[in-house]
Structure formats: structure tokens, C-alpha cells
Image: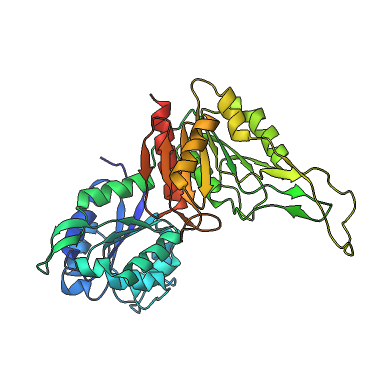
Amino acid sequence: MIELKGKTILLGVTGGIAAYKAVDIASRLVKLGAKVNVIMTKNATLLVQPLTFRYISRNPVSVDMFAEPEDWQPEHIALADKADILVVAPATANIIGKLAHGIADDMLSTTAMAVRCPVLIALAMNCHMYDNPILQNNINILKSHGFEFIEPDYGLLACGYEGKGRLAEPEKIVERIKQILNPPLDLKGKTVLVTAGPTREALDPVRFISNKSSGKMGYAIAEAAAKRGAEVILISGPTSLNPPENVNFIKVESAMQMRDEVMSHASQAQIIVMAAAVSDYRPKETSQQKLKRGQTSLTINFEENPDILAELGKNKNVNQIIVGFSMETENLIENSRKKLEKKKADLIVANDVSKEGAGFGTDTNIVTFIDSSGKTEELPLMSKYDVANAILDRATAKLSK
């Protein structure tokens, strides 16, 4: 099997008792065709000899930050530049704290600061350490920066306690690595239409009303769909984000413009994800000149913008899945369920914007899925890219029924 042929994997091993399992991880990765470079902390070398990893990986093992490099380039930079993924297994509370706060004081933490590839963290520690709120906060910090995690398993721990803290089994870790490096092309041949960002409704030539949407959720969905093989149409309001690679990017300003572009392209798409925060109202009249200061009061009359999601639901094709978003500050499930039914969507992604780590501008989200069958599924705090894939997983499953 050569599922990982051509891939370079950095395997970071820290000083947890589960370090011996990392030998099995390295062996499995080599058998799958990957080039494995192992970086060990000094404490890890007290548990497993570097020579073991050298024979398994067939590559030198990096430990000493100031060892003489083989060429002119510092070793941590050379390793970071060629990596397709950095996997830290086992990951102790210590390395999590370092990574979360930018501490780079050994070969592993310094290399982690330099990588530009996905980072996968496989947690392993005492159950009480795992439950410590400081550690959990550090995990959330890393999740907000796009780090991916494999949660520890429950069981008997080396310290004698029984609880959540065992390193996940090597085959599970390797399977996740394969998923990250070789994402499923289950959307190949399909078209996915995604809306993202805010809309702007002009008051005059220099002013507008809008909302706090950053576009991060919609852009993550577009990126994930493209990586899964889809033809992606991304219709975006104004954001500071760069469009993902390999998408058909259409830029709009107002809700009316977004509506026109969505309806123009909707018939091409098998999956439509309405992640944009579209303004519900627009000024009834837009001043052609800048509104001047000096009036004792200013009255602006508004009119309702078209309901794009409802229009899509009314006119959707039989073989088309429509996903809507519901952002609430109260009665999340009740209000989102009403929206699902009223708009005739197949799936609603509901989130409470008052929760820390959810909503506008963050790199993470906390969502609940509500589908047309009545099923409700609550997800934990996740990176927006992970949420994007979770949305596409469920939409794809519905499409295949």
C-alpha cells in the first residue's frame, strides 16, 4: 500500500509514557509510503531511544536544537519547509502550553512555529491534567488557529487512574493523517455554491449599513469543497480574505446583487450553502450626495431585502441540497427549527453568537445541525474548517440518498 507515497510527515514525540506507541505510528506511516522525520524532545529520549526511530523511519532523528546541521540551512527550518503535516504524538500538557503561547525553546516547539502545513495533535496525559481548565483553554487557543486534535481515549492510565487520557490507538491516528493528506474526493463531478461574508446597503456614496460577518465560515466551506473535488462557486460580500484556490469567485456588495448572482447560478449546483450574513433590510432611498451633518435628526426608511434562502427553497431541484445558517442569541433550537421549516431547507447550521468561540470573526465555531428529518446534532468547539467538512459530510450524505 502506498497511500502516502510522496508525503513528508514530521512526527513529534514528547515525554509521555505513551511515547512507545509513536514507534508503531512511525512504522505504519513508512509502510504506507511516507517519508517520516522524527523530532523528539529530550524527555522523550529517556523513554524511547532515538536509535529506535532512526531504524524505523530510515532517517536521522532530530533532538538537539544546536546540533551541527548537514547543510547551511538550520535544521528546524529545513524540516518545516518540506513537511506536508506535523503530527505530535503523544502530546503532553507541556507541549500544548508551549504551542498555545508561542514558546519555542527546543527542536520540536521551534519547528512547530515554522511549519506552514496542517498540525495534528494526539493528546495523552493523566485524566486530571486533561480536565484542567488551563489545558482546555490552551487547546481552544490552538483550535482557533486551525490545529487539529485527536482526543484521548478512556481507560486505565499508566499512573493508575482510570479516565480520559490514553493516547488514541496508532491505527486511528494514522487514519486521521491519511484523511488530512488525502481528503476524500466525494464531491468530484458536483457543483457546490457557497455564499459568504456580509452585504453592504448604501446610505449615500460613502456610508452603508452592514454586519460583523468576516466571511471566514463561508470561505472555509468553499476551500473544503474544492479540496474534496467539487466545482465551487463562491459568491462573497466584502471581506478582507483572499479567495481559496480553485474556486469561481464572484464578488458582490449588496443583498440584491447577491440574490441575483445566487439565482443565476443556483440551477448548476447540487449543494448550496448559504453562509453569508445577508442584510434583512436596505434603505428605501439612497442619497446621491453625502449626507451632511447639521440636521437635528435623521430619519431613514427601510424596506425588506429579498429572502434568498426562502426563494431557493421554493424553487429547488429534486436532486439539490440546500443548507442555511441560523445565528441566534436566544432560543437557538426553536428559532432555527422554525427557519428550517419556513425556508424549506434540508439542513440548518445553528449557532449562538453569544457563546465564546462562536459566530462572527472567530477562527472557531460551535454549531448545532438541524435537518429536515427532525434530527438535532450538537458539535463541540471546532475550527471553522472542521465545521465546513462536517457540513459537507452531511450534505453529501443527503445527496446520495
Q: Position of residue 123 (x, y in %)?
A: 27, 61
Does residue 354 show up?
A: yes
When the figure is inspected, residue 172 is found, relative to residue 317, above or below; the finding is: below
> Quarter-wise, where is residue 145 in the image?
bottom left
When the figure is inspected, residue 270 is found, relative to residue 194, above or below; the finding is: above
Q: Where is residue 338 in the image (x, y as percent from the top left)?
A: 49, 36
Q: Residue furthest top?
A: 318
When the figure is inspected, residue 294 is found, relative to residue 33, above or below; the finding is: below
**Residue drawn at 59 percent across, 23 percent down:** 315
**Residue drawn at 72 percent across, 38 percent down:** 256
When the figure is inspected, residue 354 is found, relative to residue 66, above or below; the finding is: above
Q: Does 340 sit left or right of 41 as displayed?
A: right
Number of callouts: 0
> Quarter-wise, where is residue 113 in the image?
bottom left
> Quarter-wise, where is residue 253 in the image?
top right
Q: Position of residue 76 (x, y in %)?
A: 39, 69
Q: Does 204 sit left or right of 19 as displayed?
A: right
Q: Could you say which is closer to the camera, residue 361 or residue 174?
A: 361
